Amino acid sequence: MSVSPPLCYPRYGGQPTSDGIPVPPLLPLMPPQAYSTALDHNLPGPANVANYRRTSHLIPAASPRSLPYTSPLREDATRSERVDAKALAHALIDAKVQFETGPAQRQYKGGSQAALWNCVDRYVRQDPPIDLRNRGMTLFLTHATGFPRQIWEPTLVRLFSHAQQDASLLIDEVWSFESVQHGDSGVLNDRELRDVFDWQDQCRDICNFLLHYLPVHCSSAPLPPRLAYIGTRPERRQVIGIGHSYGGTTITRVAIEQPGLFQRLILVEPMITPPTFTRGKGLDLLLRGALSKRSRWPSRAHAKSDILQSRSSNTWHLDVVDVFVEHGLIEQCGDAPGAVRLKTRPFDEAVVYCEWNVCYETWTGLKDIPSGLGLHWIMSAKSNVTTGGTAMTQETVWRRAENASNVRVGGAGHLIVQEAPDELASELVKALSGQPLPPLPRSQL
């Protein structure tokens, strides 16, 4: 019986549909500020995930930041049980446009000293133990808008299972990175979040972690809850970046700025589009959908039942639902015992959706990523609306054609991580198996 070849976008042979937009450099990173030692939110405790040990850690987010000084829209929205989603969506777009233009941009770009945190989960292999002379891969994961960092875990469980059976798939360590307004990070940063968010700050947060907090060496030894700051280091281990949607866009933007941070990128439905793709009605629907989302329940059981029945989430894999109920919700003080709310507030989810410049910058800069950095795209075969349709998506995945590949997954739409962890893990196995690793620096031998 013949096996059908994998579905993919054929190589693009047309002319570019756009010249792109200017790609400004990311703002430089400053050394971390002195942070308070007291935090009012506990991170999850250690857990075993297959043959890996998961621990949660904190790092100070990048500083300075591009934030307005006040947040009147957010203050009103978080005080109210219900909001006028249509009016608030328009107000968020107006706030973003004002932030990105004229005097406001000059005032706010890099002008905030707000002290924020990023949470990261580390999965380190326990069996067999880490061997520096036979190094495995380090994976760096970034999530989509609206989801906690643990949303990758159903895919990771399956990936780890494959790795136990395939000697060529040697994964030493995985780091799952969380954006400042999501999950536990969002709970910790609740007082510092604003009406506008600049995706460039997420890119700088990623750079901050990879440059200054990722330990120089990988080992099975435990790490402290707050990772230590590392100054300038001459040698950095190579990392394979894997990002979904917003997370895929931002790690690609980082690679445009600092391609040496990654050995390879695996992009899962990233929001990378040319400036000719105006989000318009689609953005309005995204914002209104997020702002209309239910955010509180009398119990986790009620939340799970609601998620299973909701039109926006009833296609999620059951394992993903369980992870979201465990890690995406927090008990709400002041409500009835057992009552929970979303860790990522619907308002903050909407604020992250309200972005276009970094999507366009990333599309523009794709062609300038050095060919030595491999690009592999994992895209949906069911829908390509979020990336501009078939022709536009085909052009995007081949914009940097050297050392690039793509595959289309038929079992899911844009939310591949949530809907198809089995299929996604299988595609990651194919992409990662047999990947050559860079030579070990002499100082680490």
Image (tube, rainbow, N blue to C red):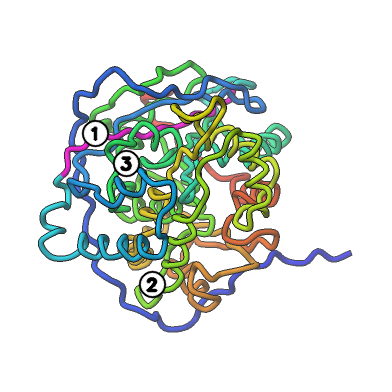
Assign a secondary structure to mark 3: helix
Q: Which residue is mark 2?
A: 274
**In whole angstroms, how far apart are the C-alphas of marks 1 and 2?**
33 Å
Quarter of image, res 319: top right
Quarter of image, res 227: top left
Tell me the residue at 70%/38% (across/down).
162
- The 10 Å Cα crowd at callout 1, few under 14, some 14 to 19, many 20 or more, is some
The image shows residue 87, relative to residue 180, as above or below, that is below
Tell me the residue at 18%/36% (across/down).
30
Disc nearest the viewer among 3 and 1: 1
Most foreground residue, 188 or 309: 309
Residue placed furthest toward the right:
1
Of labels 1 and 2, earlier in sequence is: 1
- The 10 Å Cα crowd at callout 2, few under 14, some 14 to 19, many 20 or more, is many
The image shows residue 159, relative to residue 423, as above or below, that is above
Assign a secondary structure to mark 2: loop
Tell me, yes or no, whether the two marked residues, 3 and 2, touch with CB atoms within 8 Å: no
Q: Amino acid at mark 2?
A: Pro
Q: Amino acid at mark 1?
A: Ala
Q: Which x, y percent locates residue 151?
A: 56, 41
Q: Which x, y percent locates residue 108?
A: 15, 52
Q: Which residue is mark 3?
A: 205
Q: On the picture, is 277 further left or further right than 208? A: right
The residue stretch that appears in magenta: 112-125
Q: Give me the disc on residue 115.
A: 1
Q: On the picture, is 17 further left or further right than 106? A: right
Tell me the residue at 32%/41% (across/down).
205
**In whole angstroms, how far apart are the C-alphas of marks 3 and 1?**
12 Å
**In whole angstroms, how far apart are the C-alphas of marks 3 and 2?**
24 Å
- The 10 Å Cα crowd at callout 3, few under 14, some 14 to 19, many 20 or more, is many
Of labels 3 and 2, earlier in sequence is: 3
Most foreground residue, 48 or 196: 196
